[in-house]
Amino acid sequence: AGFYGVDEGGEMILFNFWKDSKNPKGIWRKTTLSSYQTPSPKWTTVVDIDELGKKDDTSWVFKGSGTLSRSLDCSAERPTPPNLVSRTLMKLSRGGADAIVVREFDLETNEFIPASQNGFEINAEAKTSIGWKSRNVVLVGTDIGENALTDSG
């Protein structure tokens, strides 16, 4: 499980990606540290990859995520960093391919942020590398056209 901050009650929040027979593509879920330490932790689903695939009519495979560091999560609307990580860049591939698409995900609302609302989206499938510079800036390495890549991609 990955640690991503502290909730309003002071509890540490842990995230985990889980697959089972009910969720063959997997779910990204969260719980508190105190719940995690019990024999039967109470998990809350953040993203159900199987349901997302049905909604998008695409066989998505979760390829990870890159969270925005709390220290970088400041803006004019939020001058002080929050206790919890609020954004992540979710990496998905069609059917498990090496190439991915990237979508910004709001961890406070548990929803993808569309480009029309200034969310980061890279819908052109490629072997993309992406990371946060600040809340409103990402650094991207991807295929930008002819002669941009080596023979291995």
Image (tube, grey):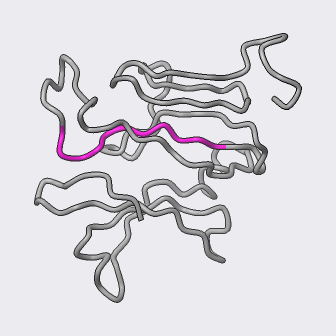
Name which quarter of the figure residue 1 lies in: bottom left
The image shows residue 23 at horizontal and vertical percentages of 61, 69
The image shows residue 67 at horizontal and vertical percentages of 40, 41
- The answer to whether residue 48 is above or below residue 41 is above
Query: Which residue lies at the image location 49% right of the left edge and 25% below the top edge?
Result: 120
Can you name the residue that lies furthest to the right here?
151
Left-right relation of 9 to 115: left
- The answer to whether residue 144 is above or below residue 150 is above
Q: Quick check: is 100 in the magenta stretch?
A: no
Q: Quick check: is 86 in the magenta stretch?
A: yes
Name which quarter of the figure residue 7 lies in: bottom left
Query: Which residue lies at the image location 64% right of the left edge and 43% below the top edge?
Result: 92
* Quarter of the picture holding the C terminus: top right
Left-right relation of 92 to 34: right
- The answer to whether residue 70 is above or below residue 7 is above
In terms of depth relative to the viewer, which is nearer, 99 or 153?
A: 153
Magenta segment, which residues? 82-92
Query: Which residue lies at the image location 17% right of the left edge and 63% below the top edge?
Result: 11
The image shows residue 39 at horizontal and vertical percentages of 34, 89
Left-right relation of 108 to 58: left
Can you name the residue that lies furthest to the top here?
146
Left-right relation of 129 to 82: right
The image shows residue 17 at horizontal and vertical percentages of 51, 62
